[in-house]
């Protein structure tokens, strides 16, 4: 096996055990390993919090403003249904969150990937809108 994702995982410092676990997960869901991308990792108490904090950090919007009361993340938290957001990422972009074995002080390691797989829709990379039933 000589997939680009393997080089990236080794460069990110994942152990051979972690890499085997990740590859088994990706192969089980029939990910196209040539097109699968590593997105990042996080340590969290559980998967729900891992997804929330990881996505929230990735969506961090920096706005240069003198008004220190402007908090975009608070607005995002009130407006976004994070479970639905994650569900759409899984279907449309082939996202996955893998829980790695071993705990660090009652916290768990999670890693995130994206790529075409058995669960992602065939139109995952097209420009279909989530509001496709609405007439514009």
Image (tube, rainbow, N blue to C red):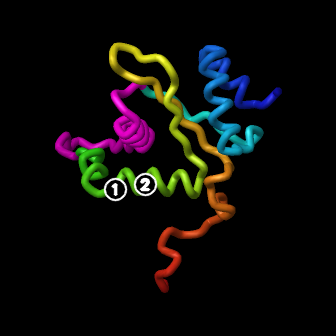
Q: Residues within 10 Å of mark 1 (few under 14, many from 20)?
A: few
Disc 1, SS:
loop
82 displayed left or right of 135: left
Q: Residue 37 appears at what percent x and percent y?
A: 65, 38
The quadrant of the image that shows the N terminus is top right
| Mark 1 in CB contact with mark 2 (< 8 angstroms) | yes
The residue that appears at 69% across and 43% down in the rendered structure is 31
Tag of residue 81 = 1
Return the mark for residue 85: 2
* Whole-percent x, y for residue 90 in the image: 54, 51
Which one is nearer the viewer's eye here, 111 or 7? Answer: 111
In screen coordinates, is 65 left or right of 88? left
Which region is colored magenta?
43-70
- Residue at image point 47% right, 82% down: 134
3D distance between C-alphas at marks 1 and 2? 6 Å
Residue 35's disc number: none
- Would residue 45 appear left or right of 9 to someone viewing this image? left
Would you say 134 lies left or right of 79 here?
right
Name the spot of residue 120 as percent of width and height, x first: 62, 55
Quadrant assignment, res 4: top right
């Amino acid at each position: 096996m000589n997939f680009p994702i393997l080089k990236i995982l080794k460069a990110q410092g994942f152990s051979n055990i972690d890499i085997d676990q990740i590859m088994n997960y990706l192969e089980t869901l029939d990910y196209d390993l040539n097109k699968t991308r590593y997105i990042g990792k996080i340590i969290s108490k559980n998967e729900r919090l891992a997804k929330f904090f990881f996505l929230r950090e990735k969506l961090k919007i920096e706005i240069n403003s003198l008004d220190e009361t402007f908090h975009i993340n608070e607005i995002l938290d009130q407006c976004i249904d994070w479970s639905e957001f994650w569900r759409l990422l899984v279907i449309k972009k082939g996202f996955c969150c893998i829980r790695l074995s071993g705990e660090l002080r009652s916290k768990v390691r999670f890693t995130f990937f994206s790529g075409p797989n058995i669960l992602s829709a065939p139109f995952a990379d097209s420009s279909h809108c989530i509001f496709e039933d609405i007439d514009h």
